[in-house]
Amino acid sequence: MPNHLFDQIARRMPAEDSPFAHLPDGRTYRYADVLAVSAQFAHALVALGVTKGDRVAVQVEKSIEALMLYLACVRAGAIFLPLNTAYTPAEIEYFLGDAEPALFVCDPSREEALKPAAMQAGARLETLGVRESKGHPAGSLSELALGQETRFADVECSADDLAAILYTSGTTGRSKGAMLSHENLASNARALVETWRFTQQDVLIHALPIFHTHGLFVATNVILFSGASMHFLPKFDPAQALALMQKATTMMGVPTFYVRLVDHPGLTQDATLKMRLFVSGSAPLLAETHRAFEAKTGHAILERYGMTETNMNTSNPYEGDRIAGTVGFPLPGVALRVSDPETGTPLPAEEIGVIEVKGPNVFKGYWRNPEKTAAEFRQDGFFITGDLGKIDARGYVHILGRGKDLIITGGYNVYPKEIEGEIDAMPGVNESAVIGLPHKDFGEGVTAVVVPVKGAAISEKSILAALEGRLAKFKQPKRVLVIDELPRNTMGKVQKNVLRDTYRDLYKAG
Ligand code: AMP
């Protein structure tokens, strides 16, 4: 029966003995295995009573079987709901309560700890582990799948049926479930394959987690939609990535991967000679990292911009200038504009406002939250991303931070990125985060949190002195805090909410 997403994957599949994934234990997973094992998992889901539209929540370590479970959900018409492996049982309780999955799949080692949460939500609990070296997959769901047929009659699903719910990372407020349809995922995979020129000859270094849109949809769906293959790694290790660059053609990473590569003595032109493309996204790539990487390798990292709710929106060009500090142009089929945050009036080039997008990539709304959904869409169907930015005269999109990070001090708007750019350019500064903290006179006090380069002698005084005359008075930080490390989530995003919380009383004392 027609299954909108899986049919497109199946139609594009290369010869069945072509490689799909090279695994850490030395196995090569072929496209024939993808078909067979995803069918077995789909049968297992059906055997457990999962029917079309049921949510299947999954909190497991990264494994090829977990990817097969994703495809099995697509084939069985279920809604795949991956959860960050770092979530605690108390957090899982919230997600299960909200999503009400029919089935919750966890790592065998966490079964006992998560049993109460599953019971409370009325979800059946099964386990899926990283395959054991002896050759048997670990976990009750894997065992069940092993005995099933290797062909499966896919459940009929239309373009608008849901394929997945991904909870937003929640760096600004409570996590919400973004409902993603078969066509949301398929249209984005097609657009990225075309934009980044993926073919069956490509070999991707995949070191991202698969509970997030980047590793799950961007990386995996691009491979599936181009019939390419990947080195599927449990986590990112710069030395391992460098070694694999001899056998790979492309890598997708978060900015932290590139920072770590630039710091590695093995990063040279020779080491990256066989590679054709490095993609970065999920958080801003410092212009400095972009330049350092290019100086060492000759490769201009291609930065793209997206979010859980919209999949990918923009990309720097494959051919043409990849400009550091920008996220390029809207992808084919995606409309993007910058609007006045208050009135929603579209703004001309170079003016800063909120980024809004519309297209087949944009999600179907927040799970069981029609009010929140309605609040984040304009009347004409554009989704308000909450990211502040501008489109420059050449059409490149620039991101200037999350709207919630905008600082309003004494009635003036201050864009943190502008101040961070000034501070980051100072000698001895590794990176910085500028936040607004409650201030009795100004509403919010501009505050810079700065991480020095190891051993560098920087201080609040030296930074404030260096900023004098470079920024308008109202933009100058009232305080500069020098710390060792910025708090980050697993995708490498700086958690400004954590910083705001930690230092919320800074201006109270004085
Ligand atoms: P998530 O939903 O976890 O993927 O987070 C999406 C958010 O990450 C976006 O709304 C942006 O704020 C940020 N983001 C993603 N890609 C970039 C990028 N290339 N540059 C700056 N911010 C980015």
Image (spheres, helix red, strand yellow):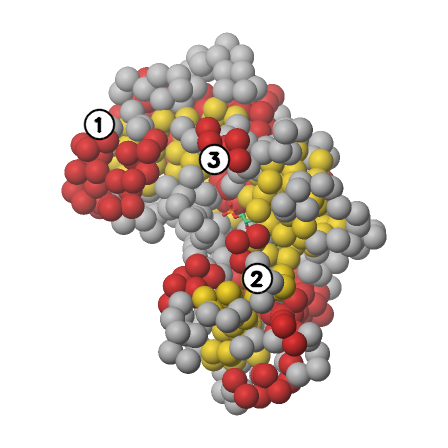
- Residue 98 figure quarter: top left
Within 10 Å of disc 3 (Cα), the crowding (few <14, some 14-19, many 20+) is few
| Rendered position, 172 above or below 45 | below
Which amino acid, by three-letter code, is at mark 3? Answer: Lys
Which of discs 2 and 1 lies nearer the camera? The answer is 2
Label 2: state its secondary structure.
strand
Up/down of 312 relative to 224, above or below: below
The answer to whether 208 is drawn above or below residue 293 in the figure is: above
Q: Which residue is mark 3?
A: 372
Label whose residue precedes the other's in the sequence (2 or 3): 3
Residue to which mark 2 is pinned? 408
Element type where label 1 sits in the image: loop
Q: What residue is drawn where x is 57% and y is 62%?
A: 408
Q: Which residue is identified by label 1?
A: 122
Q: Secondary structure beneath disc 3?
A: helix
Q: Nearer the viewer, residue 303 or 239?
A: 303
Query: Camera-side residue: 452 or 465?
Result: 465
Location of residue 233 in the rendering, given as x and y in whole percent from the top left corner: 45, 50
Q: Is residue 58 visible?
A: yes
Earlier in the chain: of badge 2 and badge 1, it is: 1
**Of 161 and 398, which appears nearest the observer?**
398
Q: How far from the left and from the top, in percent, is residue 321? A: 79, 55
Q: Is ligand 1 less than 8 Å from the beta carbon at label 1?
A: no
Q: Position of residue 508 (x, y in %)?
A: 39, 74
Residue type, label 1: Gly
Of label 3 and label 1, which has the lower sequence position?
1
The local crowd at label 1, few if under 14, some if 14 to 19, many if 20 or more residues have their Cα within 10 Å, is: some
Q: CA distance from mark 3 to mark 1?
A: 26 Å
Tell me which residue sits at (55%, 37%) in the image: 376
